[in-house]
Image (tube, rainbow, N blue to C red):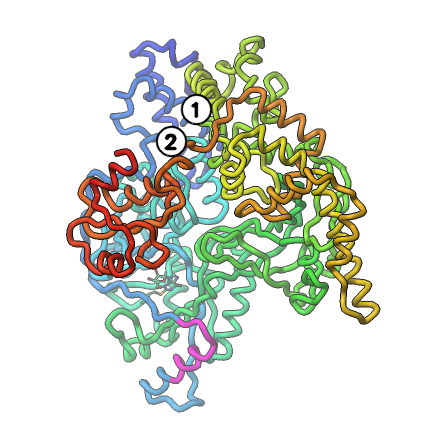
Amino acid sequence: MVAKDGSLVHGGPVADLSAAAARAEWTALAAAVARANRAYHTEDAPEISDADYDALKRRLARIEARFPELAAEGSPTAEVGAAPSETFAKVRHAVRMLSLENAFETDEIRDFDDRIRKYLNLGPDAPLAYTAEPKIDGLSLSLRYEGGRLVQAATRGDGETGENVTANARTIADIPQTIAGAPQVLEVRGEVYMSHDDFARLNERQETAGDKTFANPRNAAAGSLRQLDAAITAARPLRFFAYAWGELSAPLAETQMGAVERLSALGFQTNPATRICDGPAALVAAYREIEDGRALLGYDIDGVVYKVNDLALQARLGFRSTTPRWAIAHKFPAELAWTRLEAIDIQVGRTGALSPVARLLPVTVGGVVVSNATLHNEDYIAGRDARGNPIRDGKDIRPGDWVQVYRAGDVIPKVADVDLARRPADAVPYVFPTVCPECGSDAVREEGDSVRRCTGGLICPAQAVEKLKHFVSRGAFDIEGLGAKQIEMFFADAALPIREPADIFTLRTRDEAGLTRLKNREGFGEKSAANLFAAIEDRRSIPLARLIFALGIRHVGEVAARDLARHYAGWDALVASVDLARPAALAHRAADAAEARERRAAADEGRRARIGEARAAAIAAAAVPPASMAAWADLVETDGIGPVLALSLSDALANPQERSGIDRLTAHLTVLPPEAQVAQSPVAGKTVVFTGTLEKMTRAEAKARAEALGAKVAGSVSARTDLVVAGPGAGSKAKDAERLGVEIIDEDAWLRLIGG
Ligand code: IVH
């Protein structure tokens, strides 16, 4: 319950509330949330903490879950981004809202100045001043004041007609409702945006409430402004910078800078970084300065806008169809940004690899806030490549440095460059750890490997937890209700731990024997606990390929796992064969080392290496039994499996700790062989071409079924084609088949062939 003074008093369990009590509590809670919203956003004077605010909202949501009729009355928990039930009213702009011409290169800024001089018939030396100001990455809004009162707010829309968002705009603290000393009609234009801090807090709140989060502050600002329910906009921390105007009953000033100052005097926020420049060189200098300070602003900008300062000249220059001649946006390169490297952290992966991660002062790169980026490996940080050649001119990267972050599409952001001119005097070179930061085991780097690895194996908690996450992942055991988050939770759980895959399959019996049952835990209920146990039960039978992939053995991906499964057809056969091949695998490794030694010696002595002999001698010295040699050959010659993968698999199964964990796991499982029908299917290994119209199934379905039966489906007919399935309307492909003597059958015959 909420007490009269607004403090939060916990009510009893929602399950015990009567309908009347629920309504009373709901009303009080909804009012408290609305009041908190007003205090926070409109009055800029928060009255309760974020945690209390979240608690209020959570309790509201719980009550609404039990009494949905209450939510229908316009609750502050109303879903975020819910599909609008109606649209905003349209508003025709009295003066069109324009966009800006873009420039990326310095040359284009000189051209911009040249063009303006030409248009105005000004000589190259005639004075011509510009303003330079940050280009805010938000969405533009036009505010109409009549007699000093805000009467309408509209989005840009297509420039001619926008959407009426007046009620929403009124909830934004930076937008005054009334202004004194303004012209009778004043349209103020500017950008609605969200600061980085507010964005992070909003996303946290959204996540806690189970609502969708936003990709970047711009999306969050746009989504928040365009809410049909102004109460939702009010709960979102939006801000506004004024930088332009539309209809005016009297001019604001004679210059751009003067007009912005006037807007500031009227009570609007204007950008303090706005300055006057006397020509293209000064504009570009301003651009560099603003770009350098970008990460410290606390909100997103995507370039610098230059405008002719003299408003009489602006009027002469006028507009093209959608952009003014007197302004240009000098954009930052889309995928690059400079920011400060706060720290270098080391993450330990599933296979023990130590990966350096850059912790950055958050910066937006290509529309996404980036606060972490990869630094690849220790050589990369030191400024050299795997062969020891300098990269970035040999510049190393140190905590405290200003670094360039690069991001392309969905790729993990990387640190691309470092600015030595901005290096703090006390920055010290980064020393890459030689012990695992998670378990203290030695971290070693094998010859020819660019990666340093923890040697702790499963005693390393980081490796163990990453291996478990991999074990339950999509292509592996894929257990519903047991994702990365739950794995972290169970891994750390003292009462009901999951420390290795086998523990998953004893979870239920351990739970039943325990005192505090899973169904009573945070995040679980009777139903979700039962669902989890059922999902685990379901996976006691597992296809061989999934099991192999799930073990998370280095180099053994999904495709290799399928290849191995197909080749060995059973878990016991696979293990027996790999065990048998162990002596040969070790001999192979010794031969690799002998080969490397021979190569080095030959280079030193200036002769040709005798690789084959070195290998043969090493293998002979190992005296491997022929059966082991045969098993090894069988393994490495399996389609898709080479010596690197084979060695890694052999190492994993020969490691006593790892092996006993695997044995404990498989004791709980029924391993299903790869689909037996594939080998027996009459089309296994055949190349099939479909042509013409298929009447009983789609082309995609036909292809999938053929592939499931072991056939290869090709798009065109060649001498290698075994079978053409031709439906009505088959054209040149059927002719090709005839010419090449390839068998042609119709769809019904195909279905009979594959058993319907
Ligand atoms: S001036 C007639 N100044 O950028 C020119 N626009 O890409 C009016 N923008 O639609 C725009 N910061 O939404 C101007 N300091 C700034 C700006 C700015 C952001 C936005 C504005 C405009 C878009 C064009």
User: In the figure, residue 230 lies in which quadrant?
Assistant: top left
The amino acid sitting under disc 1 is Gly
Can you see residue 529?
A: yes
User: Residue 127 lies in magenta, yes or no?
Assistant: no
- Range of the magenta residues? 103-114
User: In the figure, residue 155 lies in which quadrant?
Assistant: bottom left
Q: Quadrant of the C terminus?
A: top left
Q: Secondary structure at mark 2?
A: helix
Image x and y of residue 281, in percent: 50, 79
> Do the CB atoms of the residues marked 2 and 1 lie less than 8 Å apart?
yes
Q: Determine the residue located farthest toward the right in the rendered image.
A: 605
Asked whether mark 1 lies closer than 8 Å to ligand 1, one says: no
User: Residue 106 lies in magenta, yes or no?
Assistant: yes
User: In the figure, residue 170 lies in which quadrant?
Assistant: top left
The amino acid sitting under disc 2 is Arg
Quick one: label 1, few (<14), some, or many (20+) residues within 10 Å? some
Nearer to the camera, 669 or 743: 743
Name the residue tied to disc 2: 35
Nearer to the camera, 663 or 15: 663
| Residue found at x 62% / y 34% | 577
**CA–CA distance between discs 2 and 1?**
9 Å
Residue 491, placed above or below residue 259: above
Image x and y of residue 299, in percent: 48, 53
Q: Secondary structure at mark 1?
A: loop
Nearer to the camera, 670 or 475: 670
Name the residue tied to disc 1: 6
Lower sequence index among marks 2 and 1? 1
Q: Which quadrant of the frame does ligand 1 lie within?
A: bottom left
Residue 643, placed above or below residue 132: above
Q: Is residue 460 left or right of residue 747?
A: right
Image x and y of residue 220, in percent: 39, 46
